[in-house]
Amino acid sequence: MIEPEATSKPAAACGCSPETRAAILDTAERLFGENGVEGTSVRDITHAAGVNLGAINYHFGTKDALVMAVFVRRLEPLNRERLRQLDVLEQKAGGQPLALEDVLGAFFKPIIQEEVGGKLPIIHILRLISRCFQEPNPELKAMLKRHFEHVCSRFDNAILRAVPELTLDEVFWRVNFLVGSLHHAMDMWARFDWVPILGLGHKPKQERPSREELIAQLIAFSAGGIRAHSVWTKKQPIS
Amino acid sequence: MIEPEATSKPAAACGCSPETRAAILDTAERLFGENGVEGTSVRDITHAAGVNLGAINYHFGTKDALVMAVFVRRLEPLNRERLRQLDVLEQKAGGQPLALEDVLGAFFKPIIQEEVGGKLPIIHILRLISRCFQEPNPELKAMLKRHFEHVCSRFDNAILRAVPELTLDEVFWRVNFLVGSLHHAMDMWARFDWVPILGLGHKPKQERPSREELIAQLIAFSAGGIRAHSVWTKKQPIS
DNA sequence: ATGCAAGTCATACAGTCGTTTCATACGCTC
DNA sequence: GAGCGTATGAAACGACTGTATGACTTGCAT
């Protein structure tokens, strides 16, 4: 594990930072997703990546800056792809409201397209996002806002046009429900073999579903949930 | 903040551990929920609780044991109340399948009943549960399994009877979707004033919804999602 | 009064944290 | 080949981590 990948050449060909930077980003993304930012030390990362301890501070300045770099590398292409798919749908529709399932597909599918933004499974960065939504770190929150603000605004509007019965507030909260479902489900999916240890109800009989099957289930669930009758227009209290 | 609550009496009345233990549990629950277990030191807890540094090790042995104690104090009465409400529903139904919304209500409502298991807002322990579902700590997982296994099994069965079209696997995953919605939404709700900073889409025009309103929305969404047409019986791939 | 057990206190321990330092080795331009 | 900027290496820094120790105080039974 500390073995510094024997295939690496003894020296880089150019003066710029070669694969060390990428190795740190890859390893940090994985370990952050598995154990959290606070649960992963810079020594964990450098040892697993087979680079020197000082490499993180040299290439990124601080550990916090590394966290930001890990996010930016993934979030930028991920959300660009989401918007691109939404653009395609709206262009096809020619001004008409989109089908709800199509909108949800444009939001979910880029998550499971592993090649978006790199060759590492996207699940790691998704688990990391899920973790960091709960963190109180203001810089982290500002960064997440910067990347998600426009995207969620576009999708909120598309969903509101697809299901005009709802109020904007209801769309806001139901989109948050949907995001929570995505995060928790993909986390469960990534650790499917351990799910019976977690013990959330029955252990499914069959194998772990494919990513495509899980996303199909997620789209069906979310669409059904968003299409549920409005409950806040009448402001009816809970029984 | 370090002020050891001036109203406390100079000495306890009995030889047993008096309010120190409870003060540690209350403070730990809050700080763990806000900053995570790894992000909260024993000094953070003891300072905020106004007790001595050694008090945690004296009363609980280790920090990990404190984490367990924090969980057990809440989870036991919470899940007991869930099962009680489900029992009442099944007794009323007399062998007939329950209404899906009633089942979901029995799962969600005890979360918002603040007086269940203590006088602290339940939101802290909910955020802590949400965080710890992602932790790789095996002892934590075993503890969560112990508390949730029976409860989720009961609710899975009730939901399966309410929506017999679904397969057991689908119920399993949709219940996980629902759990993710609950965790993420309640976390957002707890930090509603900061949500625009997080930037998940539009900022709602109106005020933060009441807990009852949010749960009503969550029940509507979840019921709609669970009632969505089965997608795995036909094993249709994603388009 | 005396002894005892429980609780609190200040302090210290060894280990780990993120970061810094300085020396060294490299590819490049002049 | 000299000089330069970039990258890596080993070691150390002070701060912080969870935990352990021993003295002190308290309420209560003898």
Image (cartoon, coloured by chain):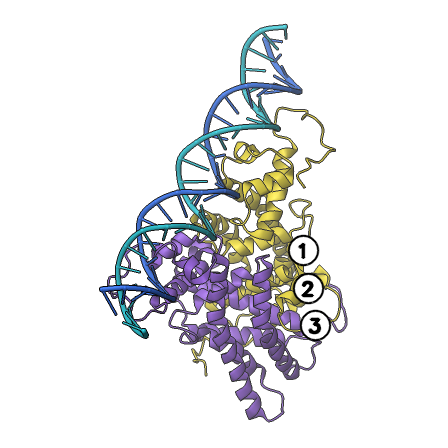
Chain colours: A yellow, B purple, C blue, D cyan
Give the label on residue A112, or none.
1
Identified at 49% across, 69% down, the residue is B72
Q: Mark 1 packing: few (<14 Cα in 10 Å), some, or many (20+)?
A: some
- Marks 1,2: beta carbons within 8 A: yes
> What is the quadrant of the N terminus of chain A in the image?
top right
User: Which amino acid, mark 3?
Assistant: Asp
Q: Chain of mark 2?
A: A
**Foreground: disc 3 or disc 1:** 3
Are discs 3 and 2 less than 8 Å apart at CB?
Answer: no
SS category of the residue bearing label 3:
helix
In the image, residue B39 lies at what x, y percent?
Answer: 46, 52
The residue identified by callout 2 is A214
Q: Secondary structure at mark 1?
A: helix
Q: Position of residue A154 (x, y in %)?
A: 54, 57
- Residue under label 3: B169
Residue pictured at 69% horizontal, 62% vertical? A193
At mark 2, the secondary structure is: helix
Do tags 1 and 2 sit on the same chain? yes
- Name the residue at 44% across, 67% down: B123
Quadrant assignment, res B209? bottom left
Residue A59's label in the rendered image is: none
Position in image of residue A212 (x %, y %):
71, 61
Residue A208 shown left or right of residue B104 in the figure: right
